[in-house]
Amino acid sequence: MREGINEVIATTAMNAAPVGVIARAGTLQAALYLTSHTAELVERDRWLVANLTHDPVLYVQTAFSDPAPEAFLQFTAGGISMCRLADAEAWAAFSVEVVRKAGATLLVNLIPIAEEICDLQVYPVNRGFSSVIEATVHATRYCVTRDPWLKQLIDHHHAIVRRCGGPRELEAMDLLTREISSRLSGQ
């Protein structure tokens, strides 16, 4: 992980969700919303796998629901039975130490156990991909708060995806738009 916040898709027990892994001063941490299923499973099981992928659709899908069981691969690392995404390009498994529960957040330290590069490719920086990630983060919050500023940010990133993204980024934004509509209409 690079210094800063690294966007990954975290897997826990047959659960997947986008999570920011915070790399600062030689430590790795994650801040999880206490109301999330991911936080509940991480606190209970004390492990997390950070899956690296460049599939923007997968980020949107996992922000709002778990993949089908066949999307996961079971493995053992450090004596712990875990799961990861079958299509991950790389992954890192961590044991978890709870630092604190404060407000709406569960802060955890991530202690590396194992990692693997499954598919080594170089990806150029793509503003469309980055905007899908940003819009997805804003959308998860917007669906809860209905904050108009978040909607403006989503729209801004949607415009960047239309201008800079490829077919997969456009598909991801269409899915994100449908997810937001569905959640706002109560379906």
Image: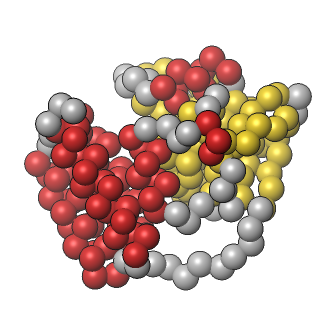
Which percent across, then down, holds residue 125? 50, 79
Query: Which quadrant of the figure has residue 100?
Result: top right
Image: 28 above or below 47 = below
Taking the spot 61% from the left edge, 32% from the top edge, the residue there is 14
Image: 123 above or below 25 = below
Residue farthest along the right direction in this orientation: 79
Taking the spot 29% from the left edge, 61% from the top edge, the residue there is 174
Residue farthest along the left direction in this orientation: 148
Taking the spot 31% from the left edge, 73% from the top edge, the residue there is 161
How many marks can you see? 0
Image: 122 above or below 170 = below
Quarter of the picture holding the N terminus: bottom right
- Can residue 178 be seen here? yes
Query: Which quadrant of the figure has residue 30?
Result: top right
Image: 145 above or below 20 = above
Which percent across, then down, holds residue 72? 67, 42
- Can residue 50 be seen here? no
Instruction: Give left or right: position of 34 versus 181.
Output: right
Q: Nearer the viewer, residue 78 or 112?
A: 78
Q: Nearer the viewer, residue 57 or 2?
A: 57
Which percent across, then down, holds residue 135? 31, 58
Instruction: Give left or right: position of 169 versus 58.
Output: left
Q: Nearer the viewer, residue 105 or 120?
A: 120
Which percent across, then down, holds residue 106? 50, 26
Query: Which quadrant of the figure has residue 45?
Result: top right
Taking the spot 81% from the left edge, 38% from the top edge, the residue there is 75
